[in-house]
Image (tube, grey):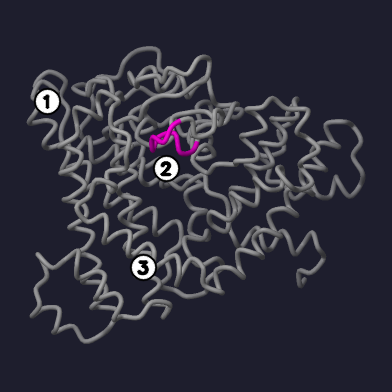
């Protein structure tokens, strides 16, 4: 892979190339990507989607929206620091093509901003709830009517693939979705493969899948345009990662490791003594003990340690990327950057404690159970009504259910796979609160 091609400014529908040296510095294409994402309805809905605690009423607990903004900030720093060294190593990128180190930061920031945009309500349990509706729930009846890859898209419903669809799917009058530049889409694509074969290798990019069958043609176009390296896997679609996807992943890893831990401390699920014990190992070379000891509140002390820890992990991830840059470009690097971090043991310790005390806390488990019931009920009611309408067999109840669909989801779909994915997409874009309200309305338990 080569950087000139990987930094493509092309957008869906473009007939020719967009050249960096012809871009307006006041309105750079990669920055337009960021703006379009942040103004999108799908991004706004993240303000009421779970990061750690579903349906939390606590004001300082992170939502998907605050998490995504923080990942974007970390991603921008990672991109700029890497970009500075890439431009120094390959000066022709600046001298001939006009690229700047900030371009790397803008690309990674935009892709990081969108990294959770396709995640359903109720966190990762929302993905599992959708998948299990088809694998072990009422949706099993559709298996024999779909291809193997279409079925795998549903039983392993994947927020990353859904996010690619959110960013790129066309609808009447909105061709190309948000029309994000190919470089940003490449950085967004952490798992550049289709749903089958499942986990064909232990490589990090094969861990999950990155697009639905309905989006495979455009996905392949983006990857090919960027010069991403195709995997040798017969007729199956799969590529080695865009290099900047490693930075997006690192930004996410850094934020959820440290900031979810911080949430757990502020909620009282993790003691402050643990915080000091675990975080001090990340910040011992940078901590100002006089300043730390002058802080009088737990919140301020934890905030100070968190900022230092994130800074340490950013610098370390940059060093790992630059050290392995040539292997990454050759498609020969198959780990997360944090797996090569000198702080890996410390990060693993924090994650282990977070799993025990936060992710598996009673509050989280109880609300995830509610989320399962909500999501599977909504899927069943809307899929039944949508399919009955397609078969001209709509009951009055079905018609009432369909009236609950937003206008943009009323578009008719000819084949079964498209209808099933359409309703999954609708449910996935609901906020936690909207999903709960719709569930209570359908069940007749909403107070009116």
Of pointers 1 and 2, the one earlier in the residue sequence:
2
User: Which residue lies under the disc numbered 2?
Assistant: 37
Counting residues from the start of the chain, the first of labels 3 and 2 encountered is 2
Upstream in sequence: badge 3 or badge 1: 1
Q: Which residues are magenta?
A: 201-208
Whole-number angstrom distance, CA of label 3 to CA of label 1:
40 Å
In the displayed structure, would residue 234 be above or below residue 44? above
Q: Position of residue 42 (x, y in %)?
A: 52, 47
Left or right of 305 on screen, residue 380: right
The local secondary structure at tag 1 comes to: helix
Which numbered disc covers residue 94?
1
* Alpha carbon distance from label 1 to label 2: 27 Å
Instruction: Mark 3 vs mark 1: give the one in front.
Output: 3
Q: Which residue is mark 3?
A: 261
Q: Could you say which is closer to the camera, residue 32 or residue 90?
A: 90
Decide: is 279 above or below 407. Answer: below
As for residue 364 lying within the magenta part, the answer is no
Query: Furthest-bottom residue in view?
Result: 296
């Amino acid at each position: 892979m080569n950087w000139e091609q990987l930094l493509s400014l092309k957008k869906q529908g473009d007939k020719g190339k967009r050249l960096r040296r012809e871009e307006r510095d006041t309105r750079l294409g990669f920055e337009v990507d960021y703006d379009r994402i942040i103004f999108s309805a799908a991004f706004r809905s993240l303000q009421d989607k779970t990061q750690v605690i579903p349906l939390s009423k606590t004001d300082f607990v992170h939502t998907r929206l605050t998490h995504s903004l923080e990942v974007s900030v970390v991603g921008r720093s990672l991109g700029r620091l890497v970009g500075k060294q890439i431009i120094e190593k390959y000066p022709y990128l600046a001298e001939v093509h006009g690229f700047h180190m900030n371009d790397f930061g803008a690309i990674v920031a935009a892709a990081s901003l969108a990294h959770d945009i396709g995640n359903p309500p109720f966190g990762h349990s929302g993905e599992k709830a959708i998948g299990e509706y088809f694998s072990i729930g009422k949706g099993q009846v559709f298996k024999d009517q779909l291809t193997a890859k279409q079925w795998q898209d549903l039983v392993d419903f994947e927020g990353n693939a859904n996010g690619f669809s959110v960013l790129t799917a066309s609808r009447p009058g909105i061709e190309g979705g948000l029309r994000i530049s190919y470089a940003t889409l490449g950085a967004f694509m952490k798992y550049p493969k289709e749903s089958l074969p499942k986990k064909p290798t232990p490589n990090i990019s094969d861990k999950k899948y990155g697009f639905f069958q309905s989006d495979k043609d455009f996905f392949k176009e983006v990857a090919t345009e960027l010069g991403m390296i195709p995997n040798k896997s017969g007729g199956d679609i799969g590529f080695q990662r865009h290099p900047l996807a490693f930075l997006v992943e690192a930004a996410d890893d850094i934020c959820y490791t440290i900031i979810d831990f911080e949430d757990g401390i502020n909620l009282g699920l993790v003691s402050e003594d643990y915080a000091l014990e675990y975080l001090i190992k990340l910040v011992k070379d940078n901590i100002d003990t006089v300043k730390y000891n002058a802080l009088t509140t737990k919140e301020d002390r934890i905030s100070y340690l968190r900022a230092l820890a994130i800074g340490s992990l950013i610098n370390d991830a940059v060093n790992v990327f630059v050290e392995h840059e040539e292997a990454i470009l050759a498609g020969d690097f198959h780990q997360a950057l944090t797996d090569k971090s000198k702080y890996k043991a410390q990060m693993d310790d924090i994650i282990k404690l977070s799993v025990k005390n936060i992710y598996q806390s009673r509050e989280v488990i109880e609300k995830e159970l509610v989320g399962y019931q909500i999501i599977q009920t909504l899927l069943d009611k809307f899929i039944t009504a949508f399919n009955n309408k397609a078969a001209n067999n709509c009951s009055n109840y079905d018609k009432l259910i369909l009236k609950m669909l937003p206008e943009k989801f009323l578009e008719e779909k000819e084949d079964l796979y498209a209808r099933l994915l359409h309703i999954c997409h609708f449910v996935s874009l609901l906020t936690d609160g909207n999903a709960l309200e719709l569930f209570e309305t359908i069940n007749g338990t909403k107070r009116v």
